[in-house]
Image (spheres, rainbow, N blue to C red):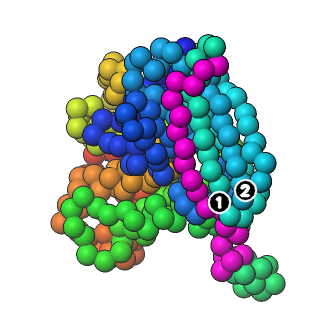
Amino acid sequence: MAVRKTETRIPLNMQAADLGQATVAADSRCALVSYVPNPLAINRENVYVVFVTDTGLATAADSYEWTFSEGGGAPQVQTTQVGEMAFTPTIPGTLTITVRILNSASTAQATLTLQQVVVPANAELESLLVQATDDSGPAMGSPDVLREMINEHSIYYQAVTPQTADPGDGYQRLVFSLAYDGAARKTAQQRKQHMEQLALSLNTGAADFATLCTTGAGVCAVRPLLLSMTIPGMITWTLLPEDTRQRAVATDGLLQSLTALDESKRIDLFNIVRFPKSNIVYCGRVLEALRNAYFNTTSFNDILTGMSGARSQWIIGQYRQGPVIRN
């Protein structure tokens, strides 16, 4: 069977479109999700994932035939044993992605098609990067990280909204800062390797899921352990002791609870952090949960600007290592 556990379900109460740009089969048996939404920047790798949620189709599936047609040129065809494929567009214009799910006799059991548009990299950003190179003033930041943020994730982080209305743009700015920081701390390749280890832990048990969940995953470095405390029906929100030794004991208990979760819930956690769109959205939800736990009556604008930013630094610290009891 070519369908891995990690591609058998969309997270509970979510749809394929909550993970990225998506197309769903008319019979709802499968879906194709693109990490990056329209428009795609030329010469930047994108990842596509096929979900097979129908057990009959999953049983029949043996391989995946991917066809990428760029700008009306000759199609590129590749076959994979798992429902994930990376592709780098090189021609501006229309990109058509077609995936056929094949059985052991190479007969198509289902077909999914997604159309995207490929455009040049963001011209304004490239101009600013050139200008920054020529100027002697402060650096703009990592060009690689800026290109990733603008060309791949801007639609996602610009669209985030808190679950409870909050005045101003402080929430969006804080989410962006965590996305930028996550991309700066680990390269795309390092994040990909970590995600592969998480997938391996669920699909084969060859890696330890709980241990991997203590490390931030995806573009916003969302820790699955902390994420699990913000999703109903998973792990109860728990503030950890300040004492380092006591905190380690309490964390071990939480990791045991994480390991004991139903496999479906662990797969849901993985897929939420796996896709940039849901990673960014749930980064915001984790930040909101932390704000509610520590500064419930304070707006995100005030958290960023008031008290010289001390409250925002506290929240970011808890996002990375907490949450701990605040005296």
Is there CB contact under 8 Å for labels 1 and 2?
Answer: yes
Residue 170: name its quadrant: bottom left
- Where does the image place residue 150, in percent across and percent down from the top left? 59, 67
Q: Is residue 122 magenta?
A: yes
Q: Which amino acid is tagged 2?
A: Gly
Q: Which amino acid is tagged 1?
A: Thr
Q: Is residue 189 left or right of residue 196?
A: right
Mark nearer the N terminus (1 vs 2): 2
Residue 224: name its quadrant: top left
Q: Looking at the image, which is closer to me, 77 or 307?
A: 77
Q: Is residue 216 visible?
A: no
Q: Residue 94 shows which numbered tag?
A: 1
- Where does the image place residue 134, in percent across and percent down from the top left? 81, 84
Q: Is residue 141 above or below residue 233?
A: below
Q: Residue 72 shows which numbered tag?
A: 2
Which element type, helix, strand or loop, lies under badge 2?
loop
Residue at 45% x, 21% y: name it: 57
Question: Which stretch did the figure color magenta?
Answer: 106-126
Which element type, helix, strand or loop, lies under badge 1?
strand
Q: Residue 245 shows which numbered tag?
A: none
Q: Is residue 265 above or below residue 165?
A: above
Residue 128: name its quadrant: bottom right
Q: Looking at the image, which is closer to me, 73 or 137?
A: 73
Residue at 40% x, 49% y: name it: 17
- Where does the image place residue 22, in percent across and percent down from the top left? 47, 47
